[in-house]
Amino acid sequence: MKKLFFIFVFIILFITDINSEIIKNIEISGNVRISDETIILFSEIKKNQDLKNENLNLIIKKLYTTNFFSDINIAFDDGILKISVKENPVVQTLQFKGIKNKRILEVLNDTIQLKEKSSFLKSIAKSDEKIITNILRSNGYYFAEVNSKIISNPNNTVDLIYDVVLGERALITKIKFIGDKKIKDRKLRSIIISEEAKFWKFISRRKYLDINRIEFDEKLLTNYYKNSGYFNISVESSSAQIIDESNFELVFNINAGEKYYFNNLKLNIPENYSIDNFKNILNLFDKLKGKIYSLNKIEKILNEIDKIVLTKEFEFINAKYDEVITKKNKINLTIKLEETEKTYIEKINIYGNYITDENVIRNSLIVDEGDAYNQILINKSINDIRSKNIFKSVKYVIEENLSKKTKIINIEVEEKPTGEIYAGAGTGTSGTSLNFGIKENNFLGQGKRIDTNFLISDTSIQGKFSLTNPNFRNSNKSLSTSIESTKTDLMSKFGYETNKTGFSVGTSFEQAENLYFSPSFSTYFETLDTSSKASAAKKKQDGSYLDLKFSYGLTLNKLNQNFQPSEGSRNHFSQDLPIFSDDWSFANTYTFSKYLRLGKDSIFSINFLAKTVNSLTGEDVRVSKRIFIPSRRLRGFEYGKIGPIDSGDHIGGNYASSLSFNSTLPQLFPTLQNIDFSLFFDTANVWGVDYNSSLDSSKIRSSTGLSIDWFTPIGPLSFSFAKPITKASSDSTETFRFDIGTSF
């Protein structure tokens, strides 16, 4: 029995020894370009390694994934592992024929997989054909055809040529919205990125068909509807329909559904947290109950929670919310605050910023390596990066190290073109104007903004250059500098002309919630010339002036949106204080705006303005500094043609105020999607002259009327029909006013 046992053990050991395949040496053959060391590295094999645990097929698979080889053979004999390879050819040259646009060529070279000096695979070349086609389509070349040509060379290299037939660029001639849309077409067109091709939009690339852009348009429409109360909004379909060989009609089929309103709002917090810390949230709940449903309003609540998390240092907390439809058009909102596992941030990695300096991104992070991990703060940091408007996309991935209870945050950004050329033109009863400008929102990869603008009108020529650093010295404060020069000819209207050149530097930051503070210093040199018929007081001001002043502004902004607001208010106060001046004048300005939603389609607004300018020394305020009421604040009167008069010229005043009431009318004509009607009542006055009180005017001017905004194929056209109610005999009135203009 013992003999049998020993025989069995001997057999097992013998078999084990036979199956033990130790790699004593590795021999590589067939390689010319790829070194032996590189092949061994990618195969992940070593000398003295037991091959019994290694699959030869797996080694072959690993080597094939390098794309270096077209054929691989492996043999093992007497401890020697023999690897025989046949290398893929190398791309010697790569060309795009049929494409001259440098920007598109740069994008193609950066995006395709095959590069010069890389290994060539026919399958990857075919894959690149599809990539090239998609990029060309995203740039409007919807009918582009791409074919690859491969020219083999004797030295195991290839010349790769992509032969491109661009065809005509696909224009979006018309954008339609169908279905249960509930909102005017004109408004919906202003929301999406795609735009109709118009002759004045010769610079814009948005007029060309881009399937990827259409998908983003769907998201923008969905978000807008949800912020307008349409909880169950659905963009049923979007399609590009061919009109002719190069023109498309873009059609969005929308099912808006009914408007929803907030009903019960509830906050759930962990047992060990005091509800007193969240009183602001409960106050917001009280204000929201019964109001129109809006994603932005929910976002505002979550932002308030972010602030509480920061101030109270609630490190390990996360916020989620649930929405439940209870009865008709009512939504119950429950926000849950939950404690999370105590983990810390080990490292933050940032990828994809080839142009943008990494510090520009890190300055937007309110978390740092070593901090407690908090999902709320992570989300806020990512949103702050996105708000810089210099990235096409911002994504992040969290890696967990369970043993160390730490997390690694990998942030990947995709940069986008940040340069912009813009132009505009306008004409109306008050004259014509033309402006042109160039912007760059990420100068030298530092997140800095440059803006160069030129404006020409019937009465003035202006050039301005400005540079803004939104995160000066890695803070949340911006620093702006500007240089401008303006020549204004008002001889025929007001009896004088000026040439003014100046420089300014200032900062801006959020002092408290929704309260912004913006101090600045400026200096400018001005020459003033008057007409021969001007009054003695005005002629006295002929000459050159140097001014150095300190200015500041306070803005309390509670509008629901800065562009076309429908709810909320805005208060702004600013003051100009002289440091050095020939007339030592100081100015104050206060504006107030309030917006209310009336019913389904009407917005009621109140706008108030008050301005003063005075001299600290009792000297006459320079005529170029005196105040005139803007035309938009007193319709029915010519600009600058109210208030004090001297020698036949309106000279402005030291004081001015205006109050306007405006109400958009419900959709009177459902078929007229591109026309808005508004009723208005304006009242204003300009008064006060330093050197002669007899020129003063105490008469309050007022007017009422109808304004029409018509969005035509040649640009937006604005009409106002105004009837002066109270006026002075010296005033110049205008019953009708129109303006047409656009930007492109």
Image (cartoon, rainbow, N blue to C red):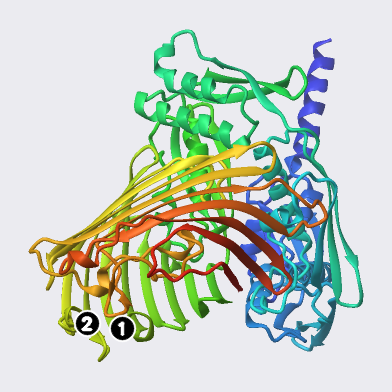
The image quadrant that residue 643 belongs to is bottom left
Q: Give the SS element for disc 1.
A: loop
Residue nearest the observer in this picture, 192 or 209: 192
Q: Residue 536 location, x and y as percent?
A: 17, 82
The image quadrant that residue 185 belongs to is bottom right
Q: Residue 34 location, x and y as percent?
A: 66, 71
Kindly tell me whether residue 477 is visible in this rendering: no
Residue nearest the observer in this picture, 664 or 325: 664
Q: How crowded is mark 1: few (under 14 residues within 10 Å), some or many (20 or more)?
A: many
N-terminal-most mark, 1 or 2: 1
Residue underneath mark 1: 495
**Residue at 18% across, 64% down:** 693
- Look at label 1 and name its amino acid: Gly
Residue nearest the observer in this picture, 43 or 25: 43
Q: Which residue lies furthest to the left in this view?
A: 617
Residue 318 as seen in the image, left or right of residue 664: left
Residue 493 as seen in the image, left or right of residue 436: left
**Residue at 71% across, 42% down:** 225
Q: Give the SS element for disc 2.
A: loop
Q: Residue 428 location, x and y as percent?
A: 57, 76
Q: Which residue lies furthest to the bottom in this view?
A: 532
**Residue at 80% across, 27% down:** 12
Q: Which residue lies furthest to the front in this view?
A: 729
Q: Residue 535 carries which label?
A: 2
